[in-house]
Image (cartoon, rainbow, N blue to C red):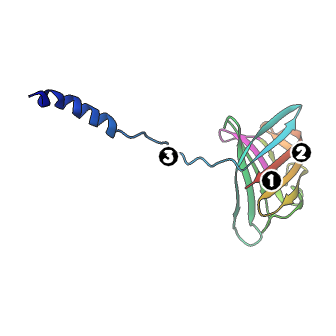
Amino acid sequence: MKFLKLLPVLFFVVLLNSCKKEYSNENLMAPIGSWQFVNAGATYSGYLDDFHASAGNVGSNAQSISGKTFDNSASFQLKFYTDSLRSGTYSTSLAQCTFLYSSNGQTIYEANQVIGEFIINVTVIDSTNITGTFSGTVADKASNSVQITNGQFAIHQ
């Protein structure tokens, strides 16, 4: 008889212990590096979470480095139009690279072949590291030409 009185309590304990914690399915990538640049005295910075190659038509292969701000409110991307990334200088005026900084799908700063001269210098590239600097003319969201200075990126895989 006592057993029957304890049965609801036992059922409740078993039910609570059988619940599993729900885990998020967002598949966030671990940071692999960092980036920063300066515009009009303001420093923008964040983490890098992706470096990958994408194949296109002949002559349109690209290497992309991308990430976010630390608060995940904006995205950062450097793209190199080359079959394999090597140390050296890449220029937007020669259609060798592009730069994009955006938030919520809206471009904040952009550099490409038609905007002006923007230079990316890849200073180190080996099996585990890619580092470099960048600077130059970008268009802001109102299509005004502004200068990005002291740009840096570093990947450590």
Q: Which residue is drawn at the image coordinates 73% and 56% (left, top)?
A: 157
Mark 3 crowdedness (10 Å alpha carbons): few <14, some 14-19, many ≥20: few
Total numbered labels placed on residues in the image: 3
Membership of 102 in magenta stretch? yes
Q: Residue 25, which numbered label?
A: 3
Q: CA gap, disc 3 to disc 2?
A: 39 Å
Relative image position of residue 17 (x, y in whole percent):
33, 37
Dividing the picture into quadrants, the one containing residue 142 is top right
Relative image position of residue 134 (x, y in whole percent):
88, 49
Q: Which residue is drawn at the image coordinates 77% and 52% (left, top)?
A: 155
Q: Which residue, given by chain and number where applicable, does mark 1 sit on?
A: 98
Q: Which residue is drawn at the image coordinates 68% and 34% (left, top)?
A: 71
| Label 3 secondary element | loop
Identify the amino acid type marked 1: Thr
Dividing the picture into quadrants, the one containing residue 56 is bottom right
Task: Work out whether residue 37 or residue 40 is closer to the camera in this orientation and state it.
Answer: 37
- Of tags 1 and 3, the one toward the viewer is 3
Magenta span of residues: 98-108
Identify the amino acid type marked 2: Thr
Q: Which residue, given by chain and number where applicable, does mark 2 sit on?
A: 137
Q: CA gap, disc 1 to disc 3?
A: 32 Å
Dividing the picture into quadrants, the one containing residue 53 is bottom right
